[in-house]
């Protein structure tokens, strides 16, 4: 019997990736779509779906399904995860998972209580370029990992490109949590180390006078187990995509728009080619999740990874919002 999935919240363009992932799998049936706000229907139209119910509660009351998938505005996602788990559904969402440490802890408690699972659409986990870089570090090709710098600036797109709710107070939840979750998870995956503390973090309004509370500037410095530091700039500034510079005791790995290069100390640079396509077991994080639920395959991105990466990202956001320094990353 096919898995049955429903999508709630069409408030960000990333939701189209989730809808596409569902539709690409013969083993999954899309049985419901809900967008409770009717003030912006562009992402419903882009996804090419028809809404089936006026509210999430109507959907839950009317349709028997397995997975609630979410593309709602960021501050609403945690409450939808809690609602889904309490209603006996698994939960899959675009990043970020939620905007509150308390909500994240409640979701973790509910998964333990119910045996249900959550997942995040962290697409770097299903990317051949990143897999090759992860393998290079895990195979010891840079020696002992010492530190890293990550640059994930994205264009702001004010006032037309970004969803309008980005600039409505209380809905976005902070730029570090919005963008850093990708790099945060990649560095955990690559090094096998956990984040211990947020050394410092800053969020600020650099140029958007029209929306003074919006954080278009966002930087953080985190300490990992054993001492390595990771710096990240994830500001909404000109630029797009990710660049990583990873230093080890024997070599330096740079991942830029031009490719991935290993630079051994005293040696010749080497281009690191993307991993063979067949080395990636799943085409998307949703494919990974659906295969696990239907066939019992081991998750490529574990639920523990989802919780730990989200907690570290939320901790960095909290430190940026409050100015707290040397803040331990809370347990989850």
Image (cartoon, rainbow, N blue to C red):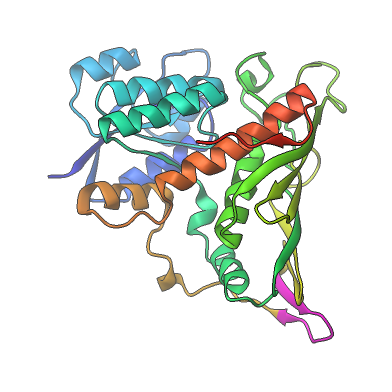
**Residue 154 visible in this rendered orientation of the protein:** yes
Magenta stretch?
260-270
Is 268 in the magenta? yes
Image quadrant holding the N terminus, namely top left
The residue nearer to you, when weighing 233 against 229, is: 229
Give residue 58's quadrant in the image. top left
Is 298 in the magenta? no
The residue nearer to you, when weighing 164 against 228, is: 228
Horizontal relation, residue 184 to residue 282: left or right: right
Please provide percent x and percent y for residue 47.
Answer: 43, 35
Give residue 32's quadrant in the image. top left
The vertical placement of 284 against 320, above or below, is: below
Please provide percent x and percent y for residue 130.
Answer: 58, 63
Please provide percent x and percent y for residue 241.
Answer: 69, 50
Horizontal relation, residue 13 to residue 119: left or right: right
**Residue 158 visible in this rendered orientation of the protein:** no
Q: Residue at x 39, y 34 (%)?
A: 48
The vertical placement of 75 against 223, above or below, is: above
Q: Residue at x 80, y 38 (%)?
A: 237
The vertical placement of 48 against 188, above or below, is: above
Q: Residue at x 83, y 23 (%)?
A: 208
The residue nearer to you, when weighing 208 against 299, is: 299
Horizontal relation, residue 220 to residue 64: left or right: right
Please provide percent x and percent y for residue 178.
Answer: 63, 34
Q: Residue at x 43, y 24 (%)?
A: 106
Horizontal relation, residue 107 to residue 129: left or right: left
């Amino acid at each position: 019997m096919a898995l049955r999935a429903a999508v709630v919240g069409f408030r960000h363009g990333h939701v189209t990736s989730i809808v596409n992932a569902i539709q690409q799998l013969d083993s999954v049936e899309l049985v419901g779509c809900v967008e409770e706000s009717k003030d912006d229907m562009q992402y419903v139209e882009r996804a090419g779906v028809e809404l089936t119910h006026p509210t999430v509660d109507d959907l839950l009351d009317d349709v028997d399904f397995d997975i609630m998938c979410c593309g709602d505005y960021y501050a609403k996602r945690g409450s939808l995860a809690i609602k889904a788990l309490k209603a006996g559904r698994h939960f899959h969402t675009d990043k970020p998972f939620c905007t509150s440490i308390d909500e994240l802890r409640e979701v973790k408690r509910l998964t333990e209580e119910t045996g249900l699972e959550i997942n995040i659409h962290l697409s770097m986990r299903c990317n051949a370029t990143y897999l090759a870089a992860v393998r290079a570090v895990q195979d010891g090709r840079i020696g002992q990992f010492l530190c890293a710098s990550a640059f994930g600036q994205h264009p702001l797109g004010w006032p037309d490109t970004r969803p309008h709710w980005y600039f409505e107070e209380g809905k976005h939840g902070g730029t570090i949590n919005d963008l850093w979750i990708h790099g945060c998870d990649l560095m955990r995956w690559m090094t096998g180390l956990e984040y211990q503390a947020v050394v410092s973090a800053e969020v600020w309004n650099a140029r958007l006078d029209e929306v003074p509370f919006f954080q278009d500037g966002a930087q953080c410095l985190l300490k990992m187990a054993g001492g390595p530091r990771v710096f990240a700039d994830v500001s909404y500034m000109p630029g797009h995509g990710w660049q990583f510079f990873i230093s080890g005791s024997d070599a330096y790995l740079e991942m830029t728009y031009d490719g991935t290069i290993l630079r051994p100390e005293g040696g010749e640079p080497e281009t690191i080619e993307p991993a063979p396509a067949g080395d990636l077991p799943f085409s998307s994080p949703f494919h990974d999740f659906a295969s696990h639920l239907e066939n019992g395959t081991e998750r490529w991105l574990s639920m523990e990874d989802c919780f730990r990466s989200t907690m570290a990202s939320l901790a960095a956001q909290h430190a940026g919002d409050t100015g707290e320094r040397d803040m331990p990353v809370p347990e989850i």
